[in-house]
Amino acid sequence: MIVFWRKIYAKHDNVKAYTLLSPALILVILAMVVPMALMLSFSMFTQVSMMEIDYTFTFQRYIDFFQKNLLVTLLIKSIKISFLVTLITLITAYPVCYYIAFYVKKNKMLWLVLLTLPFWTSYLLRVFSWKIILGTKGVINSSLINAGILSEPLTFLMYSETAVVITLTHAWAAFALLPLYVSLEKIDFSFIEAGRDLGLSRFEVFWKITFPLSLPGVIGAILIIFIPTVGDYVTPALLGGTDGRMLSNMIQAYFGKINNIPLGAASATIMLTTVVLITIIVSNVTKRLTQRLT
Amino acid sequence: MNNSFIQINNISKHFADVKAVDDVSFEIKEGEFFSLLGPSGCGKTTLLRLLAGFEYPTSGNLLIDGTDITALPPDKRPTNMVFQNYAIFPHLNVEKNIQFGLRKLGLSNDEIDKRVKDVLLLVKLEGYEERFSNQLSGGQRQRVALARALVRQPKVLLLDEPLGALDKKLRDEMQLELRTLQKNIGITFVFVTHDQQEAISMSDRVAVMNDGKIQQLSVPNELYKNPENIFVSDFIGETNFLKAETKSSDGEFINVSIEGLGEFKIKNNLNIAANSSDVVCSVRPESMMISKVKSDWDICLDAKICQTSYLGEMTRFYVEAKGIDKIITVSSQHFDNQSFENNECFISMSLEDISLLNKK
Amino acid sequence: MNEKNSTLLIYTLLYFGFLYVPVLFLPIFSFNDANYMSFPLAGFTTEHYEEMWSKRNLHKALWASIKVGVVASVVSTTIALFAAKAFARYKFRGEKISYGGIMMPFLIPEIILAVAILTIWINLGFKLGLVPVTIGHTLFCTPFAMLILIARIEGFDFSLEEASRDLGENAWGTFFRVSFPLYLPGIVAALLLSFIISFDEFILAFFLTGSDATLPMYMWGQMRFVQKLPHVLALGAVIIVFTTFIVLLAFWLRNVGQGKAKKDIAIKL
């Protein structure tokens, strides 16, 4: 008997691999897949009263979502803010990665560790820090007023969409830096030199050679920034005010004070679907862009 | 002595659609120094790993000393392996590396110490107990790997191209040492290499492999003098191939027409069919003679030297011989590259040095 | 690569400033003798730190975070270790799907994860508290630990494990005597970084802790009140220092032993 099992076990790499993988897979299934499936089914129910839920399946929640102006606006705003944040983070982080990849010779690792160090400190604390900086009595305003440059504080810096975008650009920078750096690092500098040698201007070399080659990293960075930003709760809650609210704040309300779990679940599902769709679109578009540019 | 100490019965190993080992069967004798020889990808390492237990055969079975080990995991087999890259544990010193495999044997501490001391003496590494892998040279690491395997006193020692990473001089020395070692301790060695010189100088018998199959299994002399097919003939040593056709059979001999040279009676060791053009003749460079004057050997041809390779102990001459349209290689310990003015010479061969082979 | 590009260098340094300055303000203002975070600085004081030490709720929350962090990091690193071995060592059917599946918690917005776990937890009739938080954190940390460990294992020489098997050790023995000691720096790095992730994590805790606050939850509660602000700054500063130290340690460990494998000191025979 033992010999029989021994033979099967020895023969199949699949068996060995899945034995090792089983705890991870079980964890993912029990703690993620099942809960999300449940949430999906909840999105099809109706909250009748504070304690009661009607368990008949219906798509009404989804219709409700798209009928509520507020929700649709928040969805679009969340996407818009994420898009802005992604773009700005990408553009501001790119030159830094470029510098480290091509101009730093010694201790590249050190530079990267130093760059990413701030991001290991609590996200909550960092958002809070921005609250200190951007507030009406905060660092920026008090310094400028004291220096005589301003007579009144800048109010748009706090409790606004602007505040959210600025904070998030800081929050996710590390996530952009790493994949960008990795793909830039892989580019052989001699390609760039060859481009210059062939008479291309600096800009042309960048746009036609460097950038296309760095696209895998760009895609990675886009996805890594965009996805968590869409669902961000803390930043809009702490310094978004009314203007900077995002969808996640509403979802939290539905699961909390407002107590409409089915609608909350539906909102969450819609958010997830949006994220997945955009991910797929971005991957495909950049793939085609890569093919065209290279 | 057990002549079928290791039995390999119809062993095949397929990886996806590649037949790494294709229905191979043979036996290894107890106490033998046996080599698996062949080019990269011929299946020799796979076969070794099948013996060790790191691969599981697609079909067939393996027996060592009468026991079917096919389903046994590596730790339960009476074999030990010396790995190509030595696989010395970097976090343990030499002594602990060697002791590693003794824990499971249930020996007393004294026994363990004694065995370790003895084996260090055997591989000439006394005094190196405290060193770590990164403080050893390649040759020293190889000895540690050897010691670590031998200290367990396995029935069979498997060696996976252990000398490949060493420089030539060291390799030659180690070849001699391994051979002597094996004879002294009497363990069956199964040795894998792609270096035919290594195989034929060290082994009792050699199995030449190609494309997952055994091409020929014999003692080194036989492989060299009487190769059974083109592959073996070409792989072992150097040879010249001549176009030929068999004519009529004559008992042990057969009449063969060799291009440009005429018809001769050649010994038909391999029972090659008569009237076949699917044959080839093979003559080794060192069995041919190069000379300044005509000789009285069976075949003597005018020739012109195109190139020479001076190798110190001998010289290789690349000649164009009258009647033969390809370059012939002749080696000589007598003449060298300075010997022939205007590159004119004679080359001679004896009929008993010509082998007849199937073209396959 | 011989050029120097000072424009880029200046830009990079400015960017560094942009990244670091917000983080550095917390320690700066934590010593400020005032309740507002504005310039000019009022004076140096350590009273906020003393205040921080005295808060019982803070200690409770800290202890809760440590408990959750330790459990989540140990469990997720263990699970990740086995999974990493599977991906690094074997080729098998369904490899890509399994990989994607295990990485998923990392790739979807955390709030969705939080809300989903909340739903099932409540509907199973359980109470909110540190347990669902720990489960959520474990789920979230596993893909991360796995990435670190896959990199570590891929750089590992497999013939060492084969040698161990050949020398008589079974799979478990090989793991304990050979693989584990050599993976150890990577394992510790994964443990430390997972711990930090769990320690700082807010969203899952927000939805799932109920009345048992973790440290981020405590801070969130305090952030609403201006008077309570200063000691939160002190707390923040301490956390930053602590986190930085652990992260540097983890990064150092990640690289330990990797260099050794590539170094070969040749000594003449």
Image (cartoon, coloured by chain):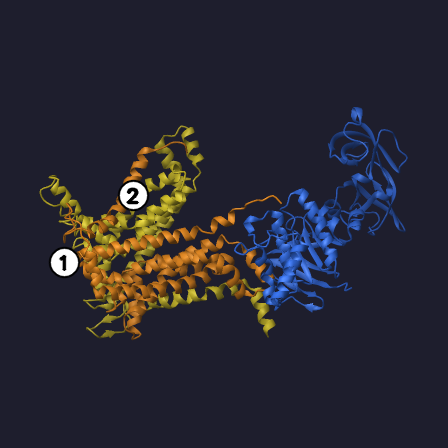
Which quarter of the image is occupied by the N terminus of chain B?
bottom right
Q: Colour of chain C?
A: orange
Left or right: B278 in relation to A275: right
Task: Check residue C227 in the rendering and tell me which mark sits there, or answer none.
Answer: 1
According to the picture, the residue beneath numbered tag 2 turns out to be: C16
Measured from the top left, where is residue B295 in percent x and y?
Answer: 89, 33
What is the chain letter for disc 1? C
Foreground label between 2 and 1 = 1
Task: Check residue B76 in the rendering and tell me which mark sits there, or answer none.
Answer: none
Q: Colour of chain A?
A: yellow
Tell me which amino acid carries mark 1.
Gln
Query: How many other residues sit within 10 Å of disc 1, few (<14), some (14-19) or many (≥20)?
Result: few
Q: Is residue B311 above or below residue B199?
A: above
Measured from the top left, where is residue A98 in percent x and y?
Answer: 36, 39
What is the chain letter for disc 2? C
Query: Which structural element holds mark 2?
Result: helix
The answer to whether marks 2 and 1 mark residues whose Cβ atoms lie closer than 8 Å is no
Measured from the top left, where is residue A243 in percent x and y?
Answer: 17, 53
Q: In front: A155, or B133?
A: B133
Can you tell which quarter of the image residue B28 is in? bottom right
Letter of the chain shown blue in the rendering: B
- Marks 2 and 1, how far apart at CA: 32 Å
Tell me which amino acid carries mark 2.
Phe
Q: Residue at x 75, y 41 (%)?
A: B238
Q: Residue at x 20, y 51 (%)?
A: C31
Q: Residue at x 62, y 65 (%)?
A: B110
Can you tell which quarter of the image residue A288 is in? top left
Measured from the top left, where is residue B20 in percent x and y?
Answer: 63, 55
Q: Residue at x 54, y 46 (%)?
A: C264
- The numbered mark, 2 or 1, whose residue comes first in the sequence reads 2
